[in-house]
Amino acid sequence: MDSSVKLTNSEYSPELTRVPSLDYIKNFIIEPKKGVPFVSVAAMAKLINNLGIETSIKTILTRIESDYKRWHKFEKSARYASHSKNGVIELMPVSDGNMFACKYVNGHPINTKQNLQTVAAFGILADVATGYPILLSEMCVLTALRTAATSAMVAKYCAPSNASTVALIGNGAQSEFQALAMKAVLGIRHFKLYDVDKAASQKTYNNLQGYDIDVVICSSAAEAVQGAQIITTCTADKKNATILHDDMIGTGVFINAIGGDCPGKTELDSKILQRADKVFVEFEPQTRVEGEIQQLPADFAVTEFYKVVQQNQSGRDNDQQLIVFDGVGFASEDFSALVFLRDLLVQQPEHLVLDLITQQADPRNLFSVVRES
């Protein structure tokens, strides 16, 4: 490890290591022919605990925002999705021309009945010039962090100035991360929880104790949204549902709708979308298929959020507007999170080394790897 490139938390800059080269990768983490760095769940937990959850979210937010500012540098496509009776398996690729990232992720709500997670994910970051992996990583925890960071980034631009209360509807694996992101970025300390499974709300309530916030469990979605200026919906059922009815939502609200993320899965009454002053999306071709706007005609007007980050469009114009973020999760956010992780490994080399790529002396002599001696 080259100590000259070590960073402190305060010195972190997403612009510092924009373009990797093979020499850079050798110095940054590990020489490619010695193996591929792999960040396990245990290593990820240690990395994030050492840095701090809220600091991690804010740092990932900075990375995502920086990459949104150079949106047109990315080679983008809607994710590949293989749907089945119980769920969906997806691949999410993206490249900025220097690095390539891809995440494997699923969504199987039925899994909780087997004591399995709804979402399982892992990802790869690779060097475009050589095709060699820079790192492999678990992405259950990392996805939760980047999703929360994205929500908080959008809320920074779209929440009303008087926002003091967040309603979290759907209290599964994402809920604690969402709460801590809104606290870390917007300073919000009052959260109202609702889930059809009260045990999920109790789990979230228990986990958020000790974080200097006020958490209340509600008996209905209507109770949760009453008095909330930010409403996050993050439910898991793979079906068209109406978590928020039009008559539940007034003006001066930001709705962070992040649960609907595949065809046939929605959370909002379509009248809310039609009434909204603005509807923001990540990558429109993907959201048309997977997001809340799948309920509406193909010409329903939406704005890709990078335009707000680049200051070509405004987020919120006044505190009376109703604004919706139809968030389905996009591959560039995973790219940003993996680059965050790459940079973090400079400070904390918490990784295993996988013998993933053959390392024979003569690159052309692959047969030597298996030839019997």
Image: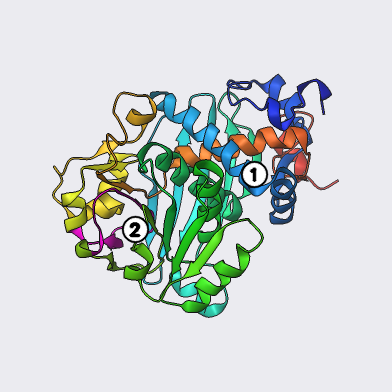
Q: In front: 321, or 56? A: 321
**Count of labels in the image:** 2
Three-letter amino acid code of the residue under disc 2: Gly
Labels 2 and 1: the sequence-earlier one: 1
Image-based side of 348 in relation to 61, left or right: right
Three-letter amino acid code of the residue under disc 1: Leu
Q: Residue at x 44, y 50 (%)?
A: 164
Q: Secondary structure at mark 1?
A: strand
Residue 367 in view in this figure: yes
Q: Give the x, y percent position of residue 2.
A: 81, 24
Asked if 219 appears above or below 60 in the picture, the reply is below
Q: Using the image, tell me which numbered label, if any, was put on residue 136.
A: 1
Q: Residue at x 34, y 35 (%)?
A: 305
Q: For label 2, count other residues whose C-alpha is less than 10 Å away and answer few (under 14), some (14-19) or many (20+).
A: many
Q: Give the x, y percent position of residue 239.
A: 30, 68
Contact (Cβ within 8 Å) of mark 2 with mark 1: no
Q: Give the x, y percent position of residue 254.
A: 33, 48
Q: Which quarter of the picture shows residue 244? A: bottom left
Q: For label 1, count other residues whose C-alpha is less than 10 Å away and answer few (under 14), some (14-19) or many (20+).
A: many
Q: Residue at x 64, y 44 (%)?
A: 136
Query: Which residue matches tag 2?
Result: 260
Asked if 323 appears above or below 223 in the picture, the reply is above
Q: Secondary structure at mark 2?
A: loop
Q: CA distance from mark 2 to mark 1?
A: 27 Å
Magenta stretch, residue numbers: 248-270
Q: Give the x, y percent position of residue 233.
A: 38, 59
Image-based side of 207 in relation to 218, left or right: right
